[in-house]
Amino acid sequence: MRIGLAWILLLSAQLFAGVARARDWSAIDALRSRLEAGGARVVQDDCGRLPRVLGLYHQASDRIVICRVHQDPAAVWDTLAHEAAAACRPARAGT
C-alpha cells in the first residue's frame, strides 16, 4: 500500500515550514511511525552492496530502505523524508 497523498502533503508542509526537525532519535521514530500509519513500510539495511547510498525507495516491494550509514538524526531525517517523497511519486503518477 503506497503512502497516501494526504500524508505526504502533511509531511511536506511540516518540512517546508521548519516545524518538523530531527533533533534526536525519538523524532525519527515518530516520523517513521507516522509513515507506517499511512501505509509505508520502513526498514533498515546495511546496504553494503550499494556503496554511497543513504536510502532508497524500492517500488517492487513498496518499501523505504534506510541504510545504516548515517551519523546523526538530521541525516536520517533528510533521507527518510526524501525517500517518502519518492514513494509517493508513483502513486501520484498513477502507476
Image (cartoon, rainbow, N blue to C red):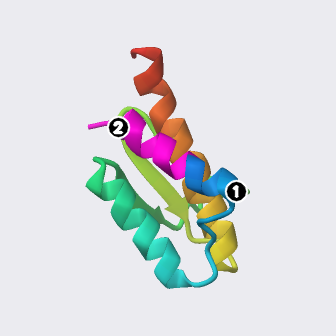
- Judged from the image, the secondary structure of the residue bearing numbered disc 1 is loop
Q: Quadrant of the N terminus?
A: top left
Q: Where is residue 14 shown, x and y percent of the image?
A: 57, 56
What residue lies at 69% left-to-right and 68% top-to-bottom? 75
**Which region shows up in magenta?**
1-12
Camera-side residue: 48 or 52?
52
| Identity of the residue furthest to the top in this view | 94
Q: Is residue 46 left or right of residue 52?
A: left
Name the residue beneath numbered marker 1.
51
Write the residue at 40% across / 45% down: 7
Where in the figure is residue 49, as x and y percent of width and height?
59, 55
Instruction: Examine the residues drawn in magenta and state their main secondary structure.
Output: helix
The three-letter amino acid code for the residue at tag 2 is: Gly
Residue 14 visible within the image: yes
- Mark 1 / mark 2, whichever is N-terminal: 2
Q: Position of residue 4 (x, y in %)?
A: 35, 37
* Residue in the image at 39% along x and 16% along y: 95
Judging depth in this view, the residue of 16 and 85 nearest the camera is 16
* Number of other residues with Cα within 10 Å of mark 1, as a class: few under 14, some 14 to 19, many 20 or more: few
**Tag 2 secondary structure:** loop
Residue type beneath disc 1: Pro
Residue position for label 2: 4
